[in-house]
Image (spheres, rainbow, N blue to C red):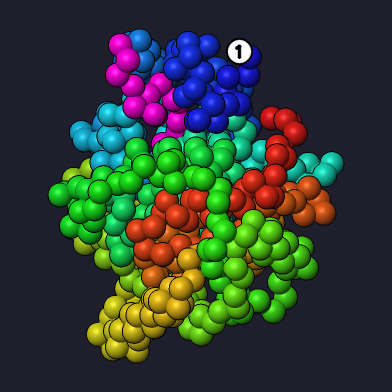
Amino acid sequence: MSDLNKLGLAEARDALRKGDTTSVELTEACLSAIDAADALNAFVHKTPEIAMERAKAADERIKAGDAPSMCGLPIGIKDLFCTKGVPSQAASRILEGFKPEYESTVSQNLADAGAVMLGKLNMDEFAMGSSNETSVYGNAISPWRRGNDDTPLTPGGSSGGSAAAVAADLCLAATGTDTGGSIRQPAAFTGITGIKPTYGRCSRWGIVAFASSLDQAGPMTKSVRDAAIMLEAMCSHDPKDSTSADLPVPDFEAALTGDIKGKTIGIPREYRMDGMPDEIEALWAEGRKMMEDAGAKIVDISLPHTKYALPAYYVIAPAEASSNLARYDGVRYGHRAKLSQGDGITEMYEKTRAEGFGAEVQRRVMVGTYVLSAGFYDAYYNRARKVRALIKKDFDDVFAQGVDAILTPATPSASFGLGEMTDADPVQMYLNDVFTVTVNLAGLPGVSVPAGVDKQGLPLGLQLIGRPWEEGDLLNSAFALERAAGFVAKPAKWW
């Protein structure tokens, strides 16, 4: 079989089971593709030795007939997941040289299921960004281009390296994390599938924290079926994470019947934004029709507190970040600034953090510290928490009325050029998360499915939001949407 790296998880799994290929061959194909794609800057720590060792072990397991569905499949791991003995920097200078002595629960679950780690993937520093332009490794670059224009485009953020790697067939799938849209927005920008499961479905243990009440890991894959396969392998109850749900993990792949007859899909009127491009509006209308044609009942719904979601998110997330990032002080691990004669511990903290954190992380830590400070805690942080409760109630009310899933655009635009947003007001960049942050604030599952292209040939995604803990049902709705949309576009190879 040629072009093995172009396979998805399900196809590769079936080929391995039939004996048409081996994990070693699959892994070698991906390692070659990675080495030829340095222009994308997607993989930032390559681990070919680990990959080959795991691939050989996976082939033995498959031969012995003891092979879970991820066994032998080569994947990339976002640099936010701690991986034993491998640099885990969260794309930040402050964690330079940090090689954990332990494995995150999610990456351990994948390793136990026989998945092959090809290396660590680029991302926005500490997952703070929507364009992968805040990374200490430099920008990740999308494999997509606008027509014949050579302008480098963003693969989205913060899981930009994961999105670029999957879209460019450097790996069969990748892990991402989503705090305000960091799986779904890059998936939409690069024409792949990404699901953020219900908060608590995947353990956060061993994932470098950004905002602990919002962060959730999930898979970024080439299809909805692949997302179902990988999500099941990633999920588990974990006593090491106090927010991990003690619930059985269903067989998500078995839920993919594609039959959504009788399902009710809600269309929220508040997601019709001023200035939304016509192409996004048209794609959303088309998505609505596709779901209707597949037998779903479409209803208009109201989520009245949506307009407060972004401001609430950009108070809560930085507040939690300023608290979580206080641990990076140059004392125990990572970067420590060179000190001058007479400098004390305070100077060491100040210089280390000033050198170690990039501008966006510094901005968010300062915002977070401000909203948590004595005079402003009630005015900002407490008020944002109350708004968050109202946003969650909006969703609860809609689901109580019998809505099974909610269909929205995934992003307010297609991918944009690197540098096109960074020089502008940072709020312009934050507006990228307008359709995704509500899902994190409410702790719900959300999936982005590629559904079309814009006039320049760039992918556009639609988002489905599901009931809590019903990822199987949500993935089945996404499967029906994927089949109806028939998205098969791939980026033309230029790298």
Q: With 64 as the anchor, is 266 left or right in this view? A: right
Q: With 318 as the anchor, is 495 left or right in this view? A: right
Looking at the rendered structure, the number of numbered marks drawn on it comes to 1
Query: Image point 43% across, 37% down: which residue?
Result: 229
Q: Percent position (x, y) of residue 129?
A: 50, 58
The residue nearer to you, when weighing 248 against 495, is 248
Q: Relative to 126, does residue 77 appear above or below in the rendering? A: above
| Most common SS among magenta residues | loop
In the image, what residue type sits under mark 1? Met
The residue nearer to you, when weighing 179 against 466, is 466
Classify residue 430 by image quadrant: bottom right
Query: Image point 59% across, 51% down: which residue?
Result: 480
The span shown in magenta is: 64-77
Classify residue 426 by image quadrant: bottom right
Q: Percent position (x, y) of residue 448?
A: 55, 54
Q: With 448 as the anchor, is 67 left or right in this view? A: left
Query: Image point 45% across, 30% down: which residue?
Result: 75
Image quarter (top left, top right, bottom left or bottom right) of the N terminus: top right
The residue nearer to you, when weighing 423 against 341, is 423
Q: Relative to 43, does residue 323 appear above or below in the rendering? A: below
Residue 413 shown in magenta: no
Q: Residues within 10 Å of mark 1 (few under 14, many from 20)?
A: few
